[in-house]
Image (cartoon, rainbow, N blue to C red):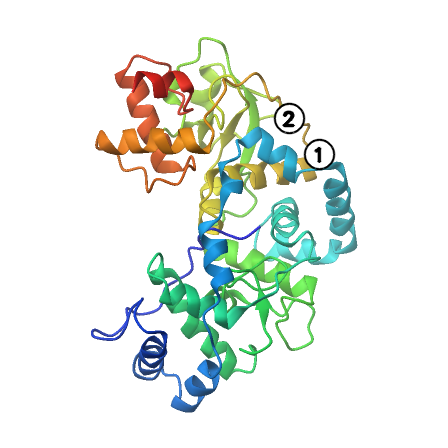
């Protein structure tokens, strides 16, 4: 499971006049080399050796365009990714690397369940880390004009790793989007947050679980993870709840939510923190209270469904019960979701592209139209909403 978007620290902006994306691939490579030398301090010989033999990979572009898995509703997505076997293996790995997780919790304040969940979803605990040539993948995506601002800086970061002897452009492999290792980190993340967790003098994210887990924890800390704080908790809501108060845009003290009738399903809620109430499939489905640490998940992956599932799975690994799926109203399939997004866009909403995925922009637009039409404002698009629009 690849990360859709990493909030890595981006390098300096490219020099004016250099090929930014598209055009002849050879000219683009020349532009990369010129910028690497002039703007990023890469030696000309290093840039030449890194780029020698790099080619476009059509399979990378196909993978980038095909992300239908994120169209699956939360309940189905979670059931697909979370199995008893995955839970049991996660807990077994927690025991196997108990000393490593103790260090992580002491040094970075990241709960072991959080990292075990990422480890499980990214590479199934390291069993499949991707077989795409990483240099080819990064350069292909930097050349492509869909998201060059994300991938171009990663090419220069990979060059720096190459100069340090920590990256081989011919043999280093990983996910189609350029992430490497057991928890799938981009080159810039590795430069900034790579940790030698096993003490052998190297950062080996593909072969060393301690290195991968410690590096992932340091990255989460760098992204703003608050030590020792929770991230999500399943809750039950009263029937007369004010649905317009749900969503990430509404943040209240936990005590205020409790006064509104929000009740925990897995132990007490953490008082003294601010939180939001989220309904991944509307008022008929499961409900969760999300704390400030939940926002950090979106710096790892921008898919709302993936983030909800990863955050919830971390609580399952720590002993939480299976969520109450409730009885969500039927949603929209991919084609109908695209119709909805097209209509919302025509009404002036920024849905972030017509892709059939219920992302943050589409949810916000759905809420606005539900309010305008006098429907319950729960952010869940239904056939009834599409019909009214």
Q: Is residue 127 left or right of residue 249?
A: right
Label 1 neighbourhood size at 10 Å, few (<14), some (14-19), many (20+)?
few
Q: Mark 2, residues whose alpha carbon is within 10 Å: few (<14), some, or many (≥20)?
A: some
Look at the numbered disc 1 and give the secondary structure of its residue. Answer: loop
Give the alpha-carbon distance from disc 2 to disc 1, as whole Å.
9 Å
Q: Quadrant of residue 140?
A: bottom left
> How far across and down, in percent of the image, does residue 26 sit?
36, 79
Residue drawn at x 73%, y 40% is: 87
Residue 248, can we see it? Answer: no
Q: Which mark is residue 261?
A: none
- Near-viewer residue (311 or 361): 361
Answer with left or right where residue 336 lies relative to residue 2: left
Q: Residue at x 47, y 31 (%)?
A: 272
Residue 180: x %, y % from top left? 57, 64
Q: Secondary structure at mark 2?
A: loop
Q: Residue at x 55, y 67 (%)?
A: 194
The residue beneath circle 2 is: 266
In the displayed structure, does residue 174 sit left or right of residue 102? Answer: left
Q: Can residue 97 be seen?
A: yes
Considering every residue shown, the one lying at the far top of the view is: 240
- Residue nearest the viewer, comparing 251 with 204: 204
Above or below: residue 307 compared with residue 7: above
Residue wearing tag 1: 319
Q: Position of residue 325 (x, y in %)?
A: 60, 22
Label 2 with label 1: CB-CB less than 8 Å: yes
């Amino acid at each position: 499971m690849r990360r859709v978007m990493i909030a890595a620290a981006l390098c300096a902006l490219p020099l004016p006049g250099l090929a930014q994306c598209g055009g002849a691939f050879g000219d683009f490579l020349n532009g990369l080399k010129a910028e690497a030398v002039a703007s990023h301090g890469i030696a000309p010989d290093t840039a030449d050796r890194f780029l020698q033999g790099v080619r476009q990979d059509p399979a990378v572009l196909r993978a980038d365009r095909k992300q239908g898995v994120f169209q699956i509703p939360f309940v189905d997505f979670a059931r697909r990714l979370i199995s008893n076997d995955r839970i049991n293996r996660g807990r077994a790995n927690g025991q196997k690397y108990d000393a490593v997780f103790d260090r992580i919790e002491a040094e970075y304040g990241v709960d072991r369940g959080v990292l075990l969940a990422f480890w499980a979803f990214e590479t199934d605990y390291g069993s499949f880390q991707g077989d795409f040539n990483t240099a080819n993948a990064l350069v292909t995506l930097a050349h492509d004009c869909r998201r060059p601002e994300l991938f171009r800086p990663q090419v220069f970061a990979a060059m720096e790793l190459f100069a340090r002897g920590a990256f081989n452009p011919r043999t280093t492999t990983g996910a189609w989007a350029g992430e490497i290792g057991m928890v799938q980190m981009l080159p810039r993340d590795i430069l900034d947050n790579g940790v030698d967790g096993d003490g052998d003098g190297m950062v080996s994210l593909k072969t060393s679980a301690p290195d991968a887990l410690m590096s992932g924890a340091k990255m989460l800390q760098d992204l703003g993870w608050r030590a020792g704080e929770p991230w999500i908790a399943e809750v039950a809501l009263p029937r007369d709840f004010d649905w317009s108060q749900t969503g990430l845009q509404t943040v209240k003290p936990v005590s205020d939510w409790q006064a509104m009738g929000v009740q925990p399903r897995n132990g007490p809620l953490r008082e003294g923190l601010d939180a939001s109430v989220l309904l991944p499939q509307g008022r008929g489905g499961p409900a969760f209270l999300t704390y400030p640490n939940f926002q950090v998940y979106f710096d790892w992956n921008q898919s709302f469904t993936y983030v909800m599932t990863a955050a919830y799975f971390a609580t399952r690994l720590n002993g939480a019960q299976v969520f109450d799926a409730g009885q969500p109203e039927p949603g929209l399939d991919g084609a109908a979701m695209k119709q909805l997004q097209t209509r919302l866009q025509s009404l002036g909403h920024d849905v972030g592209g017509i892709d059939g995925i219920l992302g943050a922009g589409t949810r916000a637009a759905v809420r606005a139209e539900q309010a305008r039409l006098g429907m319950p404002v729960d952010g869940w698009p239904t056939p009834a909403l599409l019909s009214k629009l």
